[in-house]
């Protein structure tokens, strides 16, 4: 008999408009799946899982989605379910059979009860003991039969962060939720529609299209027709393709205006899920609004109307914008629409101008006292106190970093005024402009340019890969602001858990590490954290200082490791470096860099060997050692020789370390100790019975180890399988 | 030319034909048509409920002294409640736009996600801002909760911004330029109010008095509700009016900047607690049956 052919399956969930940011999130956050051996988004993962559960194989799958439809396409699906045996455990073998091998009455009774015979059973081991099982093949259903179950299960399995109900509760009594109402289902299997019900809604072969402000229904017979029809109607199903097309249209229009598109990835992602038939058009606005800062213009356009700004060749905003419509209107209608868009933008920008004018009526300095009404963190005082704390910490930091008097003054002023823009109408309207408005309003208030820039840079980087602060004052303010948040949260017991980080502390700490490394800021973080904790005073009094600092160190070490791993450094090497010293992060990074360069060199391996051997022998001893080496206790010539090496080479090694010549320090170290220690371990039995002699030898070895591990890196952490 | 008054008449005609009872505005200051008892209480309970009405709406902080073409501290909403939400709710809405004379082929109509919430009413729902050429002309919401009650069945609330729809109908860029009737402009009727009220709301209102009024209305609402639990002898409807008064007084204080950031949530919670208790008592005392 000819085997039935594999055929495609298509399933569409037709909805009222799904939230664009929800869909963008799903599209933009695919997760790697071991089983699929590729990155897949939520929808792709669900369809694979459900088909697996129902033992239906397919060759390839594709998931498309637009604001109004989620489409699952399974290519070359099997004509029926794959076979599967089920095993039902009955009895231990010894209960099932008597000693002479005949089935017991108990077994026969159970078989009768289950309407099975001796032919259906097998003996198999379970946890090392033999048991009797019924072995039964699962019934195999044809694909067309099993699709209703599959898609019912699929729709139920799609979970979203925010869902709703609509109309009456479902007639079948099942609780059923979705992000927006589902209005149609379509299921095609090969050339045939499959008809059934999901949660009281008919699954049939109809789709609807939103066109010219209304919905039209279309009947589709074949999968090919489905794709042809949507294409003919201008719908781009694939979000990746759709975004490309939107970008292409926008860039083309921007070019025709002698400008370039203002890049806004978030907006583009959102717009991609606000339309299924993208059609871009260009329009303009009044030049009077160019008085508003670039950020206000772009944010207002993006947030209020989801339209794109166009920059001129000079990088400044031009009085033009681009909009993406759903569906391509006629030329005459396009004119009306773009005029309407212009008028609406005009009104919105007028409002922004109103806010700006209102906001600059008083200076930031005058607004600042009201910050006492604003809670920084529950239990950690007001934002006003925070700014005062930042100002004091900035003064200390400025001294440590030997900033000029001018810089110190600007930084302190920036700290004091940093949060005053939270009280402005513009930031109330566009919270993402905090800091940015602070900068403009500082300038309007007559503050120094550097003070204003620092205020503007305090929230940088705004995204994981975002731009870092560029000015020294901005970098320091950003660091202080974030560290204060982290110390306060840890002090209040609000540290992140493995899955939850509501205050974004990991992101903040990562940003701090990046800024410190990129701006080459060198100072003691231990001191800063301790000072910050003291500044927070009673608010964080519950935590003991030492315990808190320990927790913070571990937390920052993890971020430091992650940042350096991200920059291509070996994790074991970073671990070795920060196990040694982790106070001046910039310097720690220099050590990592220097050692990375020599990690395959002979000297590095020799130095590692010295450390590994000394560490091992010291590990086995728990006794407390004297404070100074006593040369008169040495018995063997070779240990005297080791000591002489130590005395002779230690100063140069130390000095190389202190002058940041870590490569040199390492080769000096290897040259000084590798050879002689080899001989030492061959000839000297360290753990002798004589306690004084033993302790003196251990102390000598520890001194040699510490010479390197306390200053440069604990090379016993190096993973040689990795080298 | 579809005048402003024609628009109201056409919407009422349309929704009456679809089976809605056409109600009248509530005669108190409210921030949205949702505060009208026909929506607040109407969305509670199991029985079908289909109504439509105009609701004059006050939002003191939105005032712009009549200088913004789109924002005012007083405007008119047209509110429709359909319980349970019909399967063709969106189509009914789009038809209503055609019925008032809009040619949807000439506009870019979009349903843009909006997770609607009213912290003062303890209400929330999911739906959209309906955009016409990027201007929000309607709020379209499937209520999920009202006064903290999880709703079943679900009501669909359609709130038209009448001025904005009229602007599209009449091709005007400024709401004050709208023709209210053939001979009367919206601005002629409303501009003076707008300017006077902005001055009052932003500059002249007596904050000490408003603070006192808040307390007075709050305690009156509490007194009428009795309790502590739902009280069979409570006067729910007058109590709800007092709650609405506190809400408006709070908005007036807000416009004067007389509510500190810290106090805000407390004020909102106080209004919400009143609204919640009104709803609880309404449900507990089975007022749904006796109100119709």
Image (spheres, rainbow, N blue to C red):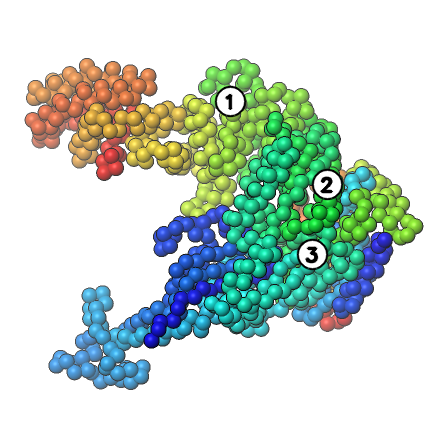
Q: Residue at x 39, y 74 (%)?
A: A141
Q: Quadrant of residue A119?
A: bottom left
**Local SS, label 1:** helix
Marks 3 and 1: in contact by CB < 8 Å? Answer: no
Tell me the CA gap for discs 1 and 3. 54 Å
Mark sitting earlier along the chain (1/2) = 2
In the depicted structure, whether residue A5 falls above or below residue A645: below
**Local SS, label 3:** loop
Classify 10 Å Cα crowding around label 3: few (below 14), some (14-19), many (20 and above): many
Mark sitting earlier along the chain (1/3) = 3
Mark 2, residue position? A342
Tell me the CA gap for discs 1 and 2. 41 Å
Residue A249 visible, this orientation: yes
Mark 1, residue position? A472
Residue A390's x, y, as percent?
Answer: 54, 27
Classify 10 Å Cα crowding around label 1: few (below 14), some (14-19), many (20 and above): some
Mark sitting earlier along the chain (2/3) = 3
Q: Are marks 1 and 3 on the same chain?
A: yes
Residue A327's x, y, as percent?
Answer: 64, 52
Residue B27's x, y, as percent?
Answer: 82, 56
**Local SS, label 2:** helix
- Total marks shown come to 3
Residue A153 visible, this orientation: no
Mark 3, residue position? A213
């Amino acid at each position: 008999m000819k085997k039935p052919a594999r055929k495609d399956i298509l399933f569409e969930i037709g909805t009222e408009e799904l939230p664009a940011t929800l869909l963008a999130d799903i599209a933009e956050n695919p997760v790697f799946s071991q089983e699929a051996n590729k990155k897949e988004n939520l929808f792709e993962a669900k369809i694979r899982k459900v088909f697996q559960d129902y033992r239906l194989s397919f060759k390839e799958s594709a998931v498309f989605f637009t604001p109004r439809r989620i489409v699952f396409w399974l290519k070359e699906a099997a004509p029926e379910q794959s076979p599967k045996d089920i095993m039902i455990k009955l009895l231990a073998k010894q209960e099932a059979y008597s000693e002479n091998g005949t089935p017991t009455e108990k077994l026969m009774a159970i078989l009768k009860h289950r309407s099975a015979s001796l032919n259906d059973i097998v003996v198999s081991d379970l946890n090392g003991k033999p048991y009797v099982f019924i072995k039964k093949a699962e019934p195999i259903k044809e694909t067309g039969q099993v699709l209703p179950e599959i898609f019912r299960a699929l729709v139920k399995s799609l979970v979203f962060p925010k869902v709703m109900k609509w109309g009456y509760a479902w007639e079948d009594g099942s609780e059923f939720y979705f992000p927006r109402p589902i209005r149609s289902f379509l299921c095609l299997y090969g050339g045939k529609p499959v008809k059934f019900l999901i949660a009281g809604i008919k699954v049939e072969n109809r789709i609807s299209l939103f066109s010219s402000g209304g919905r039209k229904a279309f009947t589709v017979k074949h999968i090919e027709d489905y794709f042809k029809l949507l294409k003919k109607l201008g719908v781009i199903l694939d979000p990746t393709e759709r975004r490309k097309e939107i970008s292409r249209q926008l860039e083309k229009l921007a070019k025709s205006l002698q400008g370039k598109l203002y890049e806004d990835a978030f907006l583009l992602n959102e717009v991609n899920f606000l339309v299924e038939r993208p059609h871009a058009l260009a329009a303009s606005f009044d030049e009077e609004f160019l008085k508003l800062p670039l950020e206000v213009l772009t944010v207002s356009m993006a947030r209020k109307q989801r339209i794109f700004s166009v920059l001129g060749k000079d990088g400044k905003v031009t009085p033009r914008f681009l909009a993406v419509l759903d569906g391509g209107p006629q030329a005459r209608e396009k004119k009306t629409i773009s005029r309407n868009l212009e008028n609406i933008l005009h009104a919105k920008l007028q409002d922004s101008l109103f806010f700006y004018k209102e906001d600059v009526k008083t200076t930031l300095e005058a607004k600042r006292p009201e910050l006492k009404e604003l809670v920084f963190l529950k239990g950690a005082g007001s934002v006003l106190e925070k700014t005062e704390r930042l100002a004091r910490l900035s003064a200390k930091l400025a001294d440590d970093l030997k900033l000029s008097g001018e810089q110190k003054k600007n930084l302190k002023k920036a700290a004091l005024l940093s949060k005053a823009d939270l009280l402005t109408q513009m930031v109330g309207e566009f919270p993402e402009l905090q800091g940015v408005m602070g900068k403009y309003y500082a300038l309007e208030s007559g503050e120094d340019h550097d003070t204003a820039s620092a205020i503007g840079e305090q929230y940088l980087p705004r995204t994981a890969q975002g731009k870092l602060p560029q000015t020294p004052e901005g970098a320091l303010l950003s660091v202080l602001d974030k560290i204060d948040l982290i110390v306060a949260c840890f002090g209040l017991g609000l540290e992140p858990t493995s899955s939850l980080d509501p205050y974004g502390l990991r992101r903040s700490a990562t940003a701090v590490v990046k800024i410190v490394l990129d701006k080459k800021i060198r100072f003691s973080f231990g001191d800063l954290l301790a000072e910050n904790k003291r500044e927070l005073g009673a608010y964080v009094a519950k935590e003991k200082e030492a315990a808190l600092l320990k927790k913070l160190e571990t937390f920052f070490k993890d971020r430091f490791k992650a940042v350096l791993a991200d920059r291509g450094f070996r994790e074991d090497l970073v671990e070795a470096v920060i196990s040694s010293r982790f106070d001046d992060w910039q310097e720690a990074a220099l050590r990592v860099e220097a050692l990375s360069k020599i990690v395959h060199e002979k000297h590095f391996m020799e130095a590692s060997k010295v450390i590994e051997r000394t560490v091992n022998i010291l590990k086995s001893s728990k006794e407390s050692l004297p404070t100074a080496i006593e040369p008169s206790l040495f018995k063997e010539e070779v240990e005297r020789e080791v000591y002489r090496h130590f005395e002779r080479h230690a100063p140069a090694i130390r000095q190389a370390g202190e002058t940041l010549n870590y490569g040199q320090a390492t080769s000096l170290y290897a040259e000084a100790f590798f050879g002689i220690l080899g001989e030492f371990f061959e000839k000297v039995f360290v753990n002798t019975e004589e306690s004084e002699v033993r302790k003196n030898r251990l102390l000598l070895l520890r001194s040699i180890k510490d010479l390197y591990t306390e200053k440069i890196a604990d090379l016993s952490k190096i993973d040689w399988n990795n080298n | 030319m579809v005048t402003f008054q024609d628009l109201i008449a056409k919407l009422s005609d349309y929704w009456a034909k679809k089976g809605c009872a056409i109600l009248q505005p509530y005669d108190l200051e409210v921030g949205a048509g949702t505060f009208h008892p026909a929506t607040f209480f109407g969305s509670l309970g199991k029985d079908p409920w289909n109504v439509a009405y105009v609701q004059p709406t006050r939002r003191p902080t939105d005032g712009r002294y009549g200088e913004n073409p789109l924002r005012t501290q007083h405007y008119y909403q047209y509110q429709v409640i359909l319980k349970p939400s019909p399967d063709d709710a969106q189509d009914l809405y789009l038809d209503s736009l055609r019925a008032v004379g809009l040619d949807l082929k000439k506009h870019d109509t979009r349903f843009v996600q909006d997770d609607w919430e009213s912290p003062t009413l303890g209400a929330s729902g999911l739906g959209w801002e309906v955009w016409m050429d990027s201007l929000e002309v309607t709020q379209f919401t499937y209520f999920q909760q009202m006064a903290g009650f999880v709703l079943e069945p679900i009501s669909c609330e359609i709130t038209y911004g009448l001025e904005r729809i009229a602007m599209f109908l009449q091709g005007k860029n400024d709401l004050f330029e709208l023709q209210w009737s053939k001979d009367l402009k919206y601005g002629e009727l409303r501009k003076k109010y707008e300017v006077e009220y902005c001055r009052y709301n932003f500059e002249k209102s007596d904050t000490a008095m408003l603070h006192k009024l808040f307390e007075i209305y709050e305690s009156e609402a509490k007194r009428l509700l009795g309790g502590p639990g739902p009280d069979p002898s409570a006067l729910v409807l007058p109590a709800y009016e007092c709650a609405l008064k506190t809400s408006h007084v709070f908005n007036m204080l807000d416009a004067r900047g007389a509510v500190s950031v810290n106090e805000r949530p407390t004020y909102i919670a106080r209004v919400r607690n009143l609204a919640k208790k009104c709803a609880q008592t309404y449900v507990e005392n089975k007022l749904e049956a006796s109100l119709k």
